[in-house]
Amino acid sequence: MTIDATSSQNTAAHPGDEHPGVRHEAYLYRDDEEFLAGTMPHLRKGMESGAPTFVVTPEHEAGLLRDALGAEVPAVQFLDPADLYTNPVRAMAALTAVARTLNTTPAWVVASDDWSRYPDELEWVRYDAVFNLSFAHIPFRTLCCYDTEALRPETIALVRQTHPRLLEGSQIVDNPAYRKPGDFVADLDRRPLAASPHSAATMQILPADLHAVRQFVAEQARRCGVTADALHNLLVAVTEVATNAIRHGKAPVTLRTWPDNGLICEVTDSGHWQPDEFITWSPPESSADSGFGLWSVGMLCDTVQVRTGATGTTVRLRTCAA
């Protein structure tokens, strides 16, 4: 995947741009006609400004936009969401890299995706909330598009809480349902994870024998079709989480694994060491920074979920099969 944020870039400030920071807007549409009616004006603003302009949508929506753009297609960079949105933390890292190249020039983006392909949908809703903080001072002009006929009502309700403004008709309006990212994320973290199955393979993690943990996970992963590269990443991630549980939690520390379109690994302990809700999302400046280990876990696994409650802390890692 290549994101070129410098093509057609004009580094001068754009006249009339009264919002120098991020614009993170949601557009709820019902059909192809509405999709084009909302997205084409957004793209044209980007093209007319001379700023980098992107489309990150599934092929069907990308085809609609290519047809509508006609001869203007070369002015827009099309990206496959399956390449950019591989997992929430990697997506945040990729956009952070783009942000560093922008200076004061806005980047105009139309984004949508097939949410049904994500096994842990709530982590992408979390991503939308954290986006508002991570890029608060970055001139992204992002229009996130959601098909109300395809998505569950609960998902639409959550989407409304993570975008400060909405596109309604031809007007951008303030969103009364928007919630501060900290409050929204805290509510997500109060939602319990689904219980692990009774059939889950289980072992106790001993501080002196993390090698046994890696052997145990490797055996379970191979049974679930996890590829060699993904297995290597998973072993590094599980070792990091187990180490954190041993250092910051309380015994017993337990590892459970079970198949679910790949492998889920869950580390639980009796402590209350949940990190700051945003520490695992933004790329640290160096490996010596606090939070680097948990951030790297987010980069290595498809999703990472952390919950702390009365009985202790749970970290759940998902690695999908090829």
Image: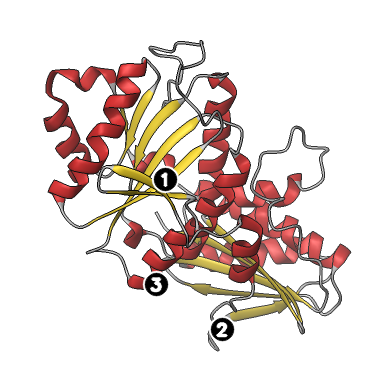
Q: To which quarter of the image does residue 70 belong?
A: top left
Residue topped by disc 1: 25
Q: Which of 98 and 19 is in front in this view?
A: 19
Side of 101 relative to 170 (left or right)? right
Q: Check disc 2: other Cα within 10 Å, few if <14, some if 14-19, many if 20+.
A: few
Dot 2 amino acid type:
Ala
> Mark 2 near mark 1, Cβ–Cβ under 8 Å?
no
Q: Is mark 2 on a helix, strand or loop?
A: loop
Q: Residue 237 placed where, x, y %?
A: 66, 54
Q: Which of marks 1 and 3 is nearer the N terminus?
A: 1
Tell which tag, 2 or 1, sits nearer the viewer: 1
The residue at 13%/18% (across/down) is 71
Residue 260 point in image, percent of width and height: 45, 71
The residue tagged 2 is: 195
In this rendering, the label closer to the viewer, 2 or 3: 3
Q: What element carries label 3?
A: helix
- Find the distance from the CA under tag 2 to the CA under tag 1: 35 Å
Q: In this view, does 114 lie to the left or right of 248?
A: left
Q: In which quarter of the image is residue 200?
A: bottom right
Q: Give the labeled residue for mark 3.
A: 154
Residue visible at 40% across and 14% down? 7
